[in-house]
Amino acid sequence: MDTKNLAHYKTLLERQKEELLREIASHAQKEDFGSDVDSSDEATDEAEEAGNRLAIVESLKEDVGEIDSALEKIRRGTYGVCERCGASIEEEVLTTAPESAVCRSCKKK
Ligand SMILES: [Zn+2]
């Protein structure tokens, strides 16, 4: 992959990471709950909601991890190479999901 494309994907990845971190921060700010719980039903709802939020944050963190490893690959010069078969990852795949670690056919498997 040429350096111009690499720079383009790097920008995309960094922007995506920023957005994810912002989203994680906004979920973290809502941690304060339960001070006005007056029924057990409500407590269950809030516990469930907190659980969902935790799941969302966990999945956001996983996305950040994927982006970090893609950025690391850019630094090492191995970005855009499929982790499973070693082929070049299709441009369309990288354009829709620049953090992709595998090519289209490997993703399908
Ligand atoms: Zn592959």
Image: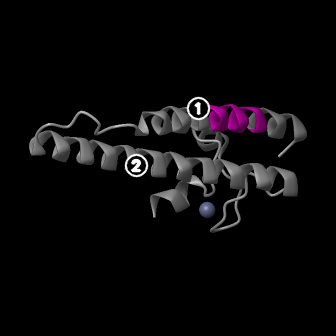
Q: Report which quarter residue 30 is drawn in.
A: top left
Compare marks 2 and 1 and give the one earlier in the sequence. 1
Residue 77: horizontal and vertical position, in percent? 86, 55
Estimate the spatial distance between the alpha carbons at disc 2 and disc 1, rounded to whole Å: 15 Å
Q: Main secondary structure of the magenta part?
A: helix
Left or right for 53, reference 83: left
Mark 2 surroundings: few (<14), some (14-19) or many (≥20) residues within 10 A: some
For image coordinates 78% across by 32% down, the residue present is: 8
The amino acid at mark 2 is: Leu
Q: Nearer the viewer, residue 62 or 1?
A: 62
Which label was assigned to residue 38?
none
- In the image, ligand 1 is in what quadrant? bottom right
Q: Secondary structure at mark 2?
A: helix
Q: Which residue is mark 2?
A: 54
Where is 8 relative to 102, above or below?
A: above
- Range of the magenta residues? 10-19
| Residue picked out by circle 1 | 22
Q: Is residue 101 above or below residue 31?
A: below
Q: Residues at badges 2 and 1 in contact (C-beta under 8 Å)?
A: no
Q: Can residue 75 be spotted in the picture?
A: yes
